[in-house]
Image: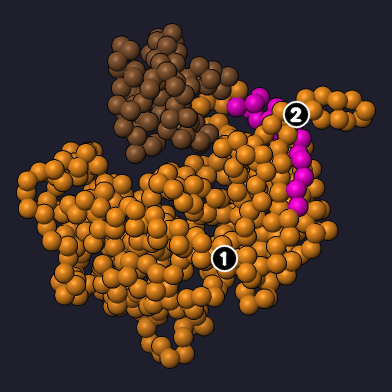
Chain colours: A orange, B brown
Amino acid sequence: MPSLGADMEAGTVVEWLVKPGDPIKRGDIIAIVDTEKATIEVEAWETGTLEQVLVPVGEKVPVGTVLALIQGAAAEAAQARPPAQARPEVVPAPKPPVVTAPPPPPLLAPKPPRGRPPAGAPRLRISPLAKRIAQELAVDVSKVQGTGPDGAITRADVERAAKAPAPKAPTAPPQAVAPAAAEAPKPAERVRPAIAPQERQAMMRRAIAAAMARSKREIPHYYLAAHIDMSRAMGWLQSENLKRPVANRLLYSVLLLKAVALAIREFPEMNGFCTDGVFRPSDAVHIGVAISLREGGLIAPAIHDVNRKSLEEVMDSLRALVKRVRAGVLRSSEIADATITITSLGEEGVETVFGIIYPPQVALVGFGKIIEQPWAMNGMVGARPVIKATLSADHRASDGHRGALFLAKIDRLLQTPEKL
Amino acid sequence: MTDDEIKALVLSELGKIAPETYPSQIDPTVELREQVDLDSMDFLNLMIAINEATGIEIPEADYPQLATLDGCVRYLRSRKA
C-alpha cells in the first residue's frame, strides 16, 4: 500500500486490474485503492510479471503493506529489493507508516488510456461517480443496465437501481474474495462495503488533522508575505486570451505555477523533502496544487515537471488534474510526489493565506485574491491589480533571507509574463 | 435553439462539472458560481462545453453576461445559438 501523502495511514483495495501471470509495465495502473480523500489509481513502480496478489479486494491495510508480488524483469531494480525478499519484487517497496520516505521519481512510462484496464480483463463501464454512489447505496453494479455511452452505467442508472425493489446483493463476503485474487475480478466483487459519506468526511477530517498536527509539531515554520503587482501579467494574459479560442485560454493561476517553478531553479532549498531532519533537494519540480473537494476537505495532487512545461502544457495538466479531483479518481504518482505546494484561496475572496507545510515538503507558496488597489511608484499613485504572495517555509532547509529572495524572484518573473 | 434547449444544455454541462448539482435547485437569476461553487477552472470548462455544443465563440470579455442561467439563455439567443 503506497503512502499517498503524509495524511494517509491506510487504504482499501477496491479493484485489481491485473491477475497473476499478467505482464506489467512500469507506470501501468494495476489496482484501484480507496482512501479517505479519493479513489486512487495505483501505478506499478516496476516492470515484470504479476506473481501473486496478497491483499484481496475489500481489505483495508496500513501504508507499507505489500499488496502484490511482481516478478521483476530488470536487474537494476535489485537495489530496491528488500534483503529478505530474495526472489519476487515487492510492489510497492514497504514504507514505514509514520515517517514518509521521499516518494519515487516520476513515472516516465506511458500510461494506458484512462478507463481501459492494462490487462485484457473485461471491465465494467461505469463512471467513478456512479461507482462511488453505487457503493454508498449498496447497489450491485453487475446487475445494473447501463444507459450511457457504450452501455456505461451512469449515476442515474445506479439511483434507479437503488430504488428498484430487486433484492440487494450482499456485500462481498471475505472468503469469496480470496479465490477472486487468482482470476479476473468479477463485477460483483468490485462493490466494497459502503462507507457512508459522513463517515468518509470524518475520516478525511481526522487524516488532515493528523498530518497538519504533525507538520506544526515537527516543522519549524517561518512565514513571509509580499505584494506583487499583477498589472503586466494580467494585461498580457488578457491580450493573449483574446487571440485564443475558448478551449485554449489560460487562467492566471498557470502564470503563478510557472513563476514558482522557475524561481525554484535558484532556490533549491524550497523544493524537496525533509526526512528525519535531513533535507534533500529535488531535481524535479512537481508542484502540488491544493484543490478543495466538493464534498469538503482538501487534496493537493502534483503537476509534474512544471519548470519544463509550456504554459499551455501546465494549463492542460491543471485542467486534467481538476477534472480527476472532481471525479474523485487520482493517480498514485500525482498524489505521492509533490516537491512543493501552492495554495490559492483567491477564488474565495481571501486576501492572504499562510499555508501549513505538507510534510515531508519544506515550503508552501500561498496566493490570495487579485485586488485592485492603490499602488505608489515613482512618486505617483495609480490603481493596480495586486496579489499577496506568501511563503511558509521550513527553517531546517532555509531561512527568512533566502525566503524573501525567493518571493522577490517570483515577483520579478511575473513582471515578464511573456517569458514564462 | 429554443430557450428551453439552451437551458437544458447549460444545465447538463453544469451537471458534468458539478455532479452534486440538482438542476431543479438552480435559481436562473442568481450567479451560477455562487450557487454551484464554481471556480474559474470550472467556469472555463463550462464555457468550453457550451462552445463545443453550439459552435459559438465566447470572448473572455463576455463572460460576465453568462454569469446566470438566464444570462446564458439571453446571450446565446442573441448570438443565434
Q: Earlier in the sequence, mark 2 or mark 1?
A: 1
The chain carrying label 2 is A
Q: Quadrant of residue A414?
A: top right
Q: Would you say A36 lies left or right of A398 here?
A: left
Q: Which residue is drawn at the image coordinates 57% and 54% (left, top)?
A: A288
The spot of residue A205 in percent (x, y) is 45, 58
What kind of residue is marked 1? Ala
- Read off the chain for label 1: A
Residue stretch in magenta: A224-241
Q: Amino acid at mark 2?
A: Gln
The quadrant of the rendering that contains the N terminus of chain A is bottom left
Q: Position of residue B55 (x, y in %)?
A: 41, 20
Labelled pair 2, 1 in contact (Cβ < 8 Å): no
Quadrant of the image for the C terminus of chain A? top right
User: Which label is found at residue A373?
Assistant: 2
Crowd class of label 2 (few under 14; some 14 to 19; many from 20; radius 10 Å): some
Observer-nearest of B16 and A392 = A392
